Amino acid sequence: MLERVIISGGGTGGHIFPAIAIANEIKLRNPKADILFIGALGRMEMEKVPMAGYKIIGLPIAGIQRRLTLTNLLVPFKLIRSIWMARTIIKDFKPQMVVGVGGYASSAVLYAASVSGIPTVIQEQNSYAGLTNKILGKRVKKICVAYEGMERFFPKNKLVITGNPVRSEIKEALNISIQTAKESLGYRPDQPLLLVIGGSLGARTINNSIQNGLDVLHASGIQLLWQTGKNFKADVKNLEGMKASEFIYDMKTAYAAADLVVSRAGAISVSELCLLGKPSILVPSPNVSEDHQTKNALALTEKDAAVLIKDSEAATTLVNKVVEILNNKNSLKALGEKIGSLARPNALKEIVNTIETAL
């Protein structure tokens, strides 16, 4: 039984959410478990983890900037200092297990844990492993992955295909009929509904494409539920059945109501779409390390389980593809069935089972 655990990583919601979900499952199995998070100072985990009810310690670690900057010269020194701090934290906390979910902090913490003889496990969300996890792969005991073919990056004997954890509230969408969900959100149940989500900050290319294609969507009888993010001001022109907001708080109902989803291809978003069996058009962000969103999307499109549109092509093709799919019920049904077949609904339990067996 897990009693003292350190979970490290963050930087993005795609790392932080799995980390918190893992912690919650550990606490569900053992309410007396003591869980400590270690993140990077100034990153979003320093806010989100305490909001979830867990203690977190920040390290002064940072990543290398893509452009040439003077701050890059400080990275090695911050890494060395962070490893030293991590070793001190581990010595004081005395964890049974250290779990890394990716992100700057996990590199220092998992390295410090491994040289201290503490068992370590990695949870890799993407189909293309991040640099931190690839480096640490040889030092850890087990590696939980969501995609096949990850032996390209990690020792095969350490891999366990678990899938990615999905928020419990998202799973509730499975219990809501599409007609009920549409009506509760103020939409007509007899017309198709497009859900557009680009993340909490929005996705400029997706947003511009939807804004410029509103008249085409409306003329095609398509309703719209659009999360723009806080950096984009949408104008739905008072068109009937068209709604836009910075953030959708009731995501379970939004997912349940959608006939088709347009989304970026972050690992957790892809896992949610698989679990819910939602026909999807994925527009991978080009602004992520090692272009891992494109690789996440390809893992689906190679099995005809989603449609991929390049960010550079979205302006000219996205809206037309939406109309084409929503006008073809057979295509819509096939996409939903194939993406649903890739779901791993017990991912979280399998991840924590793996962590427990790695003790």
Image (spheres, helix red, strand yellow):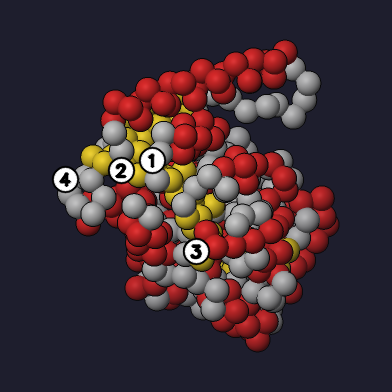
Q: Residues within 10 Å of mark 3 (few under 14, many from 20)?
A: some
Q: Secondary structure at mark 1?
A: loop
| Residue 251 seen in render | yes
- Closer to the observer: label 1 or label 4? 1
Residue 347, x across and y down, in percent: 42, 64
Q: Amino acid at mark 3?
A: Val
Q: CA distance from mark 2 to mark 4?
A: 14 Å
Residue position marked by numbered label 2 in the rendering: 96
Using the numbered discs, state the Cα–Cα distance from disc 3 to disc 2 in whole angstroms.
Answer: 20 Å
For badge 2, the amino acid type reads Gln
Residue 74 in picture, x, y percent from top left: 64, 15
At 35% across and 39% down in the image, what residue appears?
Answer: 6
Residue 296 showing in the rendered view:
no
In the foreground, 23 or 177: 23
Q: Judge depth for marks 2 and 4 and give the one in front.
A: 2
Residue that label 4 marks: 32
Is the residue under label 1 in contact with that under label 2 (CB below 8 Å)? Answer: yes
Tags 3 and 2 touching, CB below 8 Å: no
Secondary structure found at label 4: loop
Residue where numbered disc 3 is placed:
160
